[in-house]
Image: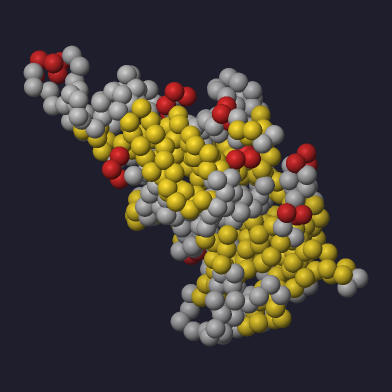
């Protein structure tokens, strides 16, 4: 499910029963136009939420071309279900000579890497200061808005934004450049060349200093190209001291300066809902595991580097976002998604998807549930493998460098949810890299139809109080930091029905889905 939003893709608005920036009746109070790309060839379309600009009215779903001011902002809303949303806001704190504008496809690679179906939604930031500097400073924050059920009051919980994305929206010429500064470290994660030749394109990374003393910020400068269809996308992982306090919504600040030969343009995105979601049918709830320790392969430029021509380099290698290497179940770390992919086969998170949301490649990322328990034969005689009172003993591969809790649920009674009586759990020691057994006893109320299981790996400190495990925090659909969630379908092969008259009353099907 990876493609990148480098103005070479397609953007889809994230609204539907809007609640993040709406009144209690769901009526929009502020526009929501920032979004993920849905089209294009970019690698990270599932990860990067692109900031769109220029909305005017609360119901706008697209930006517009206009001069930006200190009062401008952009919002994003990611619907998890009818009772839970991830909300993001970015405000302009200070701006000089910057407008919102549509990209020019003559110069841009973003219209082929990250865009929407009609290439009309992406309104990036353009310099209006012909051949001179433009400046802009931002503040971003995110929160989960959730309620227990429809009709209940919403509660907001701040969450941290993992990373910052910076892209050349229209390929720079020989005198054009743009930079972005924030507290963290920069890596080029994608370099796109839509030509058949090598052309100049330069990158510089440096520590920001005040009175010759580093202030903790890093600055990346890109540009000085040849107006060809080449450009770079850079990612910054925020340092812990980049965040404001929880009471101040974990806000992060960053600023940009750019200069055109005439005018030039930049695109900025966020790694916001960088998380692992459940993919069983929606009735089973919407657990979220936020991946705080986002991992990357660094580019080979180094943390600090003088101006380097990566466009003509024969040795430059881009960095990359990678799956977590610890604190997960199975053989692979969780695959971050922008939102849940609910599915009737619990494989929504295991596939890549094309721009039409059609399944393509089966990644098999979720592989911790034992294959021997994927399929049972239902019989009422002793000796079958699914009789009442029998044990299901699942060996779950766990890799964690912190103290953790492994929990599992099986919907035995087929009521479309995971009940507390269907839960088992076990504490896991730090630095475990091996199988952990979860054991269920098949209850009296089990039904002979296919069902679902859920596995969750929690970091111990998120399900404990004062160092003591709190079972009330081990639930099937909460939000938590770290760890992983996996959903699996369990097929139950039912008894064949021999009396056809019974079909008119209570049909029982073989291998009921």
Residue 307 drawn at (x, y percent): 70, 81
**Residue 204 or residue 89, whichever sits in front:** 204
Q: Residue at x 75, y 41 (%)?
A: 246
Q: In which quarter of the image is residue 342?
A: top left
Q: Residue at x 48, y 42 (%)?
A: 485
Q: How many marks?
A: 0
**Residue 334 or residue 272, whichever sits in front:** 334
Left or right: residue 420 versus residue 376 is right
Q: Which residue is drawn at 59% across and 56% down?
A: 294
Residue 143 drawn at (x, y percent): 66, 40
Which quadrant: the N terminus? bottom left
> Looking at the image, can residue 491 be seen?
yes
Residue 368 drawn above or below residue 169? above
Left or right: residue 306 versus residue 5 is right
Q: In which quarter of the image is residue 445?
A: top left
> Looking at the image, can residue 336 be seen?
no
**Residue 51 or residue 227, whichever sits in front:** 51
Residue 201 drawn at (x, y percent): 61, 80
Residue 426 drawn above or below residue 105? above
Q: Which residue is drawn at 66% across and 36% down?
A: 467
Residue 31 drawn above or below residue 106? above
Which quadrant: the C terminus? top left
Left or right: residue 308 versus residue 510 is right
């Amino acid at each position: 499910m990876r493609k990148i939003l480098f103005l070479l893709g397609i953007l889809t608005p994230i609204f539907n029963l809007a609640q993040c920036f709406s009144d209690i009746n769901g009526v929009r109070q502020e526009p929501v136009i920032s979004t993920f790309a849905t089209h294009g060839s970019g690698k990270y379309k599932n990860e990067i939420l692109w900031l769109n600009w220029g909305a005017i009215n609360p119901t706008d779903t697209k930006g517009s071309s206009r001069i930006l001011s200190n009062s401008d902002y952009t919002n994003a809303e990611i619907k998890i279900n009818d009772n839970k949303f991830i909300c993001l806001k970015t405000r302009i704190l200070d701006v000089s000579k910057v407008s919102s504008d549509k990209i020019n496809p003559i110069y841009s690679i973003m219209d082929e890497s990250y865009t929407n179906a009609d290439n009309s939604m992406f309104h990036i930031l353009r310099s209006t200061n012909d051949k001179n500097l433009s400046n802009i400073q931002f503040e971003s924050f995110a929160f989960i808005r959730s309620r227990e059920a429809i009709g209940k009051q919403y509660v907001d919980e701040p969450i941290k934004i993992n990373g910052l994305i910076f892209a050349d929206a229209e390929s720079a010429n020989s005198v054009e450049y743009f930079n972005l500064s924030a507290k963290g470290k920069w890596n080029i994660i994608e370099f796109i060349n839509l030509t058949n030749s090598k052309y100049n394109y330069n990158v510089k990374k440096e520590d920001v200093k005040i009175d010759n003393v580093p202030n903790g910020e890093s600055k990346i400068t890109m540009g000085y190209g040849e107006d060809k269809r080449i450009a770079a996308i850079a990612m910054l992982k925020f340092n812990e001291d980049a965040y404001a306090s929880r009471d101040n919504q974990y806000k992060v600040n960053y600023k940009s300066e750019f200069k055109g030969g005439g005018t030039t343009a930049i695109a900025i995105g966020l790694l916001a809902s960088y998380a692992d979601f459940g993919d069983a049918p929606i009735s089973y709830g919407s657990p979220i595991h936020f991946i705080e320790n986002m991992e990357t392969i660094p580019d080979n430029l180094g943390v600090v580097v003088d101006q380097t021509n990566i466009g003509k380099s024969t040795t430059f290698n881009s960095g990359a976002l990678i799956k977590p290497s610890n604190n997960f179940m199975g053989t692979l770390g969780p695959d971050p998604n922008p939102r849940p992919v609910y599915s009737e086969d619990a494989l929504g998170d295991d596939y890549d998807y094309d721009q039409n949301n059609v399944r393509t490649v089966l990644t098999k990322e979720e592989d911790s549930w034992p294959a021997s328990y994927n399929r049972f034969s239902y019989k009422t005689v002793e000796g079958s493998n699914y009789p009442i009172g029998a044990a299901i003993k699942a060996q779950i591969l766990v890799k964690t460098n912190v103290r953790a809790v492994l929990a599992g649920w099986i919907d035995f009674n087929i009521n479309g949810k995971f009940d507390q009586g269907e839960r088992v759990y076990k504490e896991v020691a730090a630095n475990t890299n091996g199988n952990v057994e979860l054991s269920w006893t098949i209850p009296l109320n089990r039904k002979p139809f296919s069902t679902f299981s859920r596995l969750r790996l929690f970091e111990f400190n998120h399900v404990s109080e004062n160092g003591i495990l709190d079972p009330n925090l081990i639930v099937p659909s909460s939000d938590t930091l770290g760890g992983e969630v996996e959903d699996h379908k369990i097929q139950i092969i039912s008894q064949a029905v021999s009396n056809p008259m019974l079909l008119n009353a209570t049909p029982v099907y073989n291998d009921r889905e």
